[in-house]
Image (cartoon, helix red, strand yellow):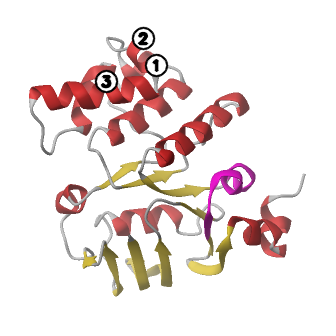
């Protein structure tokens, strides 16, 4: 579904990604592991067209997207839950969800999409008239995922969804990601929480200093010396 071939990016004179190649298969949960500063968020931004590659190509469902504007990439079926969630704090839950369906909708279609999100996240239905700024971190994480799902994406990009959450909420968020995937949405999960990520991912990649240094199934990554020493030590 998604393929990056030899993608490199720069911020001014600084090279952030160096010849990154990876592929995400339809219907799967793929993960990207790596420490802070490794280029994970830059890779997400490159997929979305926010950062333009200086080399390489990015394709989605066989069509090249690395020169398209971001709104056209989103129209093709890619949605993102950004790092830090970034909900609209002064808007209510319903207003935030409506923002996620900004591309194409009818009133009846909007209601159907919203009810699907409420079925997945009942807490949001209970808080539908509450302003996002007054919600807990876990509730805001649900809202950010619900907002992304309002566009009915084929591919959902998740950038550090567990960041700053209590362990119990982390468990809930990862369970929700599995549910989203089982409903037919392909997931590309960018995370530092390697243990939880490898519990739900089908396979993935390890990014360090802007380069892919490991790849394989979840079991292979779990057994990798690099992953075990860097991320899985108790």
The residue that appears at 24% across and 56% down in the rendered structure is 74
Tell which of 10 and 71 is nearer to you. Answer: 71
Work out whether mark 3 precedes mark 2 in sequence or the reverse, and give the earlier one.
3
Q: At which x and y percent is residue 175?
A: 61, 38
Q: Secondary structure at mark 3?
A: helix
Question: Circle 1 is placed at which residue position?
Answer: 122
Q: Is residue 66 visible?
A: yes
Residue bearing the label numbered 2? 126
172 vs 90, left or right, is right
Foreground tag (3 vs 2): 3
Q: Is residue 119 left or right of residue 107?
A: right
Q: Are marks 1 and 2 in contact (CB under 8 Å)?
A: yes
Image quarter hosting the N terminus: bottom left
| Badge 2 element | helix
> Where does residue 139 sit, x and y in percent of width and height?
50, 24
Q: Which mark is residue 115?
A: 3
Q: Which residues are magenta?
A: 193-204
Q: Residue at x 35, y 25 (%)?
A: 89
Q: Is residue 29 above or below residue 229?
A: above
Q: Residue at x 22, y 30 (%)?
A: 98
User: Can you say whether 66 is above or below 77 in the image?
Assistant: below
Taking the spot 26% from the left edge, 38% from the top edge, the residue there is 100
Q: How dense is the environment of label 1, judged by Cα within 10 Å: few (below 14), some, or many (20 and up)?
A: some
């Amino acid at each position: 579904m998604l393929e990056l071939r030899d993608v490199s990016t720069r911020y001014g004179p600084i090279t952030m990604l160096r010849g990154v190649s990876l592929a995400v298969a339809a219907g799967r949960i793929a993960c990207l592991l790596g420490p802070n500063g490794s280029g994970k968020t830059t890779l997400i931004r490159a997929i979305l067209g926010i950062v333009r590659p200086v080399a390489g190509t990015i394709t989605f469902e066989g069509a090249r997207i690395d020169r398209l504007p971001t709104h056209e990439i989103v129209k093709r079926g890619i949605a993102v839950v950004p790092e830090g969630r970034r909900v609209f704090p002064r808007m209510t839950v319903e207003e935030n969800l409506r923002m996620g369906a900004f591309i194409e909708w009818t009133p009846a279609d909007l209601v159907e999409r919203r009810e699907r999100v409420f079925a997945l996240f009942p807490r949001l239905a209970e808080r539908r008239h509450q302003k996002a700024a007054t919600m807990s971190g876990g509730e805001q994480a649900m809202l950010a995922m619900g907002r992304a799902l309002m566009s009915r994406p084929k591919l959902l990009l998740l950038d550090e969804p567990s960041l700053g959450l209590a362990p119990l909420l982390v468990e809930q968020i990862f369970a929700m990601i599995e549910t989203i995937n089982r409903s037919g949405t392909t997931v590309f999960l960018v995370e530092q929480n390697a243990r939880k990520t490898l519990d739900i991912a089908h396979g993935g990649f390890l990014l360090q200093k802007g380069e892919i240094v490991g790849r394989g199934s979840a079991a292979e990554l779990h057994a990798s010396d690099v992953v075990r020493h860097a991320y899985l030590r108790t």
